[in-house]
Image (cartoon, rainbow, N blue to C red):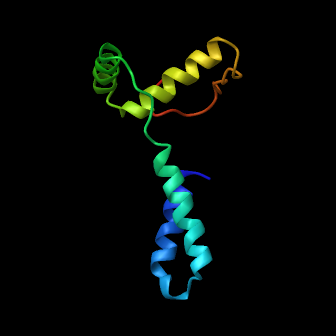
Amino acid sequence: MTRLSVAEDLESAADRIADMSRADLQVILRRAALMLRNVAGVPLEPSIEEALSSLAAEMEIGRSDLIQIVLREWLEAKAYLPVRTIDEESETDSSA
């Protein structure tokens, strides 16, 4: 269950709250609570936080996007994930 699907479930429940059973509402609220409880993130050293923030600003991307890029590249380099292949024939938006 992704955060997006939980958010969509919550919005849908809000739109039809009068028609929902108590049990269905309980399930949706418990899922949302679990999702919120697990978003605390990973505590990082101040020097790492500063480096991430600087690099994200330099690359003009969000901090979480940068963390995903770094983590994916590290996992690929260590062979924990298959290396993505780039289709030489495909069009790009001038970015590598």
Asked if 65 appears above or below 71 in the picture, the reply is below
Figure disc tally: 0
Asked if 30 appears above or below 51 in the picture, the reply is below
| Residue 94 in view, yes or no | no
Q: Which residue is drawn at 57% across and 16% down?
A: 74
Q: Where is residue 67 in the image (x, y as percent from the top left)?
A: 45, 26
Q: Position of residue 44 (x, y in %)?
A: 39, 21
Q: Where is residue 10 in the image (x, y as percent from the top left)?
A: 49, 68
Q: Which residue is drawn at 52% across and 65% down?
A: 29
Depth check, front residue: 85 or 17: 17
The answer to which quarter of the image holds residue 41 is top left
Q: Residue at x 28, y 20 (%)?
A: 54
Asked if 31 appears above or below 20 in the picture, the reply is above
The answer to which quarter of the image holds residue 28 is bottom right
Q: Which residue is drawn at 36% across and 34% down?
A: 62
Depth check, front residue: 69 or 45: 45
Horizontal placement of 86 versus 10: left or right? right
| Residue 46 in view, yes or no | yes
Q: Where is residue 23 in the image (x, y as percent from the top left)?
A: 62, 76
Asked if 86 appears above or below 14 in the picture, the reply is above
